[in-house]
Image (cartoon, rainbow, N blue to C red):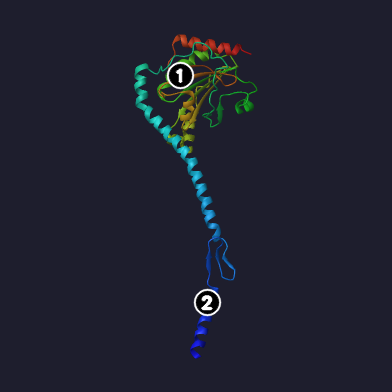
Amino acid sequence: MALATRLNRILKQHQSTVSVLPFRNPNQGLFLAHGENLSPHVSQVPALLSSTRSFLDFYKLGNKKAIEEERARLKDEMTRGYFMDMKEYGIHGGKVAAANKTLIPAVAAMKFPVLAVTYPSGKTFKLPVTSNSNEVQTESSTVPKASLVCLSFRASSKDMIDSWRTPFLESFSNSKDVHFYEVSFIDKWLLCLSPVKYLLLRVLRNPKNNESTALQTQNAYSFGNHYYFRKQLRILNLLTGYVFLLDKCGRIRWQGVGKPTPEEVSSLLSCTSLLLEAQ
């Protein structure tokens, strides 16, 4: 009897111990035998991990497209390179194409891409200047009927731009409906840093704007990488100069490149006159 009593006591102690031990329910997390939930948030961990993983996958997917675009850009720029530009420049002297002979019809003309530029004074604005631009809203009540925008990416194109600039300013110096912009591109990362950029603009604060003419002439600078801007305009060789004649809607109605021939200068002047005569 004593042995049976001891066995019953041991069995009861074992049952009481088991009654307070937790067991894992795969659907509800960690619970006690009598139903008390010790860790209600544990069951949410798989869902949380799943949602986090989905977000990370989406983030990687978004970045993957940007990475591919950046790779394509680098490959394109490395394929061209400075030496390719030099080789072409040695062949044609920067005359990569002939200028238009007549105005491009308005329905077929493409819009000049929006370009942020900075004056030597530090003021920034965007080209082209149209009726919707801040430049017109803040400084002028009229939109230029014609604007000549000259783009220079390297110092080698400076003389080319001047060869377009001089006859253009001489012909339309008395016109208030014509604007002239000479934009120099600065893509060196060091020169684009704010302190260096500020000092550089101070050095450049005396542009050739002291001509007493009715025609508005502006020298401006554009900082940073301009790959996609150049791509829209199909600009490949950076050693040459590019000129674009825009109408009042910011459309490219005529364009030239390199150093002009007398015929090309005559074409630019006549096309500008046609834009001025248009209503």
Task: Give the residue drawn at x 34%, y 22%.
Answer: 87
Residue 141 placement, left or right of 235: right
Q: Amino acid at mark 1?
A: Ile
- Above or below, comparing residue 166 to residue 26 in the picture: above
Q: Quickly name the residue at label 1.
A: 161
| Residue 136 rendering spot, x and y as whole percentages | 62, 25
Mark 2 crowd level (few <14, some 14–19, many ≥20, 10 Å Cα): few
Q: Quickly name the residue at label 2.
A: 17
Give the SS element for disc 2.
helix
Measured Cα–Cα span from mark 1 to mark 2: 94 Å
Mark 1 crowd level (few <14, some 14–19, many ≥20, 10 Å Cα): many
Task: Give the residue drawn at x 61%, y 11%.
Answer: 277
Q: Amino acid at mark 2?
A: Thr
In this rendered view, identify the residue nearer to me: 243 or 206. Answer: 243
Q: In the rendered structure, which disc, 1 or 2, sits on the residue that comes first in sequence?
A: 2
Task: Give the residue drawn at x 60%, y 27%.
Answer: 135
